[in-house]
Image: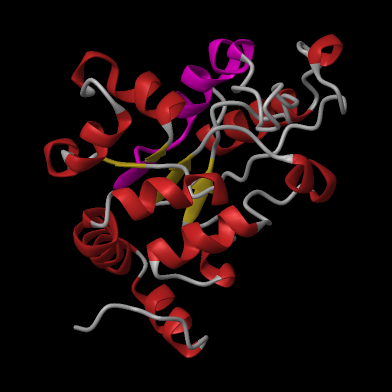
Amino acid sequence: MKPKRDSLDDLLCEIRACRACAASLPLGPRPVLRVGASARLHVCGQAPGTKVHATGLPYNDRSGERLRDWLGIGPEAFYDESRVAIVPMGFCYPGRDPRGGDLPPRPECAALWRARLLAEMPPPALTLLIGQYAIAWHLGARRRASLTETVAAWRDYLPAYFPLPHPSWRNTGWLARNPWFEIECVPALRRLVRGLLPAAGAEARGLGGQREAG
């Protein structure tokens, strides 16, 4: 039997060579994910945007800045594959919808790869479920009637999962209508992440970002 590390590396090569949705992707296939065999924190989002597609670096945009602020960590920790795995529901940019937002992740991606990839990765201490597609796939019937209700019930999904809204600037209105998220959820999330990645909290404080006391 092949060592698990070799199996994971082989699977990542398959994923990065995937062309299953090529005819449906306006910018062509470019799978974007970051995986390390020892990562204790998994970040499960939706799909890359145009900037991420261009750079190949996930959350290399305003959404990433907001997400890292929610987590209380800086880029060095966030992009350390030995500590943080970034595995979205769709690995390639899916295109724009008529209203100017991004289309949902291509459904073929999770069907082809997600279960296989998670089976090759050691179970994380915590998985962040960012947005409705990640929440639906991982929580299934356990999720509430809406994303807002699911995020508000975040305690019910610990210790395995922490559901979150998407950090996109398009959700600024949602954050304004739901101030409890930044009052209650964000400090709790930072404490959990600091427990998993203790050195990352010191790094973020060194950057001068606003963090919760204690």
Colour mapping: secondary structure
Q: Residue at x 43, y 48 (%)?
A: 173
Q: Is residue 119 magenta?
A: yes
Tell me if residue 89 can be seen. Answer: yes
- In the image shown, does 149 or 140 lie closer to the viewer? 149
- The kind of secondary structure the magenta stretch mainly shows is helix
Location of the C terminus by quadrant is bottom left
Q: Is residue 142 above or below residue 10?
A: above
Q: Position of residue 51 (x, y in %)?
A: 77, 48
Q: Is residue 60 above or below residue 50?
A: below
Would you identify the image quadrant in which residue 24 lies? Answer: top right
Would you identify the image quadrant in which residue 189 lies? Answer: bottom left
Q: Residue at x 31, y 46 (%)?
A: 126
Q: Is residue 143 above or below residue 213?
A: above
In the displayed structure, does residue 123 sit left or right of residue 35? left
Tell me if residue 38 can be seen. Answer: no
Q: Residue at x 34, y 79 (%)?
A: 211
Q: Position of residue 200 (x, y in %)?
A: 43, 74
The span picked out in magenta is 107-128
Q: Residue at x 29, y 61 (%)?
A: 182
Check the image and name the residue furthest to the left: 156
Q: Position of residue 66 (x, y in %)?
A: 50, 61
